[in-house]
Each structure stands twice: as structure tokens, then as C-alpha cells.
Amino acid sequence: MKTYQHKVIIHWGDTDPAKIVFYPNYFEWFDQSTRLFFDNVGLDWDALMVKYGVRGLPIVEAKAKFIAPCLFRDEITVATSINKWNDKTFECQHVILNRGVRSVEGYEIRVWSRSHPDDPQRLKAYSIPDEIKAAFI
């Protein structure tokens, strides 16, 4: 199973008055890491739209566990892997390390979706192609 990692420097605007990361920012970094992971294996969002008609990979569930604080000016590592594939959904695991210490753990469950055939304004879940799953092994 592949893992994608990237660094994030915590800026002043990412924190609360105590200089601790404001929790919604972790979910933003999870989302960015998922997109960057897809880019890294050659499946950027634009390519998914062109080749598979995917309009998005919406999140239907997300959770985070905060273990240790991350502060203004810290440089963290966001590590993302896909640990579970279902027919129409997949689960991204995220770990945030701060100076080698596990600070946050989280996940997102996302849906492989395209336009609904009866109403293009709506999305419909479809089966994830095996070649997509194979790109992350």
C-alpha cells in the first residue's frame, strides 16, 4: 500500500489565540493530501473527469483524533494512505506528525461519483474501476 507525504508549515492564520492549530485546518490538510495523493499516482481531478466522468469524490464521513498540539511555526508532515476500498467508496487514512510525534489521526470516506443520469445537477455513486484501486497499491 502506497503512502503519500507532504510538509505543511503552520502559519499564524492557521492557529487560535493560544497559537494552537484551529481544528478545521486539519480537515483542510486531509483534503489537500488526498488530492495530492491522487495527483502523485497520475490521477489528478481533471484526468478523472475526462476519462471517467468523475465530478468529484465527495466526503460522506470524516473524523479526527487530536493527540498532541501543533503550534504556530511548526512544520508538520501529513501522511495519507488508502486503507480500504469498497465497491463505491474508499477510506483515506491520515496521520499528522510533528517533529516525529504522532499528533493527529483521521480519516475520510469518499464516494466515487458522476452525474446522475436523470438529473445532471445531482451526483450518483458508481463502482470504482479496478485500475484506480491498482494505482494505489
Image: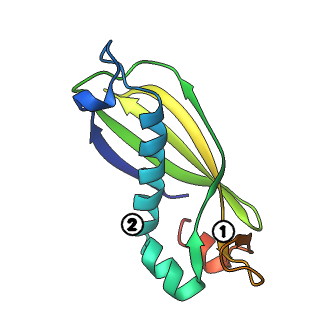
Q: Which residue is drawn at 77% across and 68% down?
A: 87
Q: Are marks 2 and 1 in contact (CB under 8 Å)?
A: no
**Quarter where residue 136 is shown:** bottom right
Q: Residue at x 46, y 72 (%)?
A: 45
How many numbered tags mark residues here?
2
Along the line of sight, the residue nearer the viewer: 33 or 22:
22
Q: Which amino acid does label 2 sit on?
A: Asn
Mark 2 or 1, nearer chain start: 2
Q: Where is residue 27 in the image (x, y as percent from the top left)?
A: 49, 40
**Quarter where residue 129 is shown:** bottom right
Q: Can residue 25 be seen in this view?
A: yes
Name above or below for residue 129 compared with residue 71. Answer: below
Q: Is residue 53 left or right of residue 118?
A: left
Name above or below for residue 124 compared with residue 13. Answer: below
Name above or below for residue 72 compared with residue 82. Answer: above
Q: Position of residue 21 (x, y in %)?
A: 37, 25
**Disc 1: which residue:** 112
Q: In this view, does 82 lie to the left or right of 125?
A: left
Q: What residue type is labelled 1?
A: Trp
Quadrant holding the C terminus: bottom right
Q: Which residue is drawn at 41% across and 26% down?
A: 22
**Disc 2: which residue:** 40
Q: Position of residue 135 (x, y in %)?
A: 53, 72
Mark 1: give few (<14), some (14-19) or many (20+) Cα within 10 Å.
many
Q: Where is residue 19 in the image (x, y as percent from the top left)?
A: 30, 17
Q: In this view, does 133 lie to the left or right of 101?
A: right
User: Helix or strand or loop: what does disc 1 sit on?
Assistant: loop
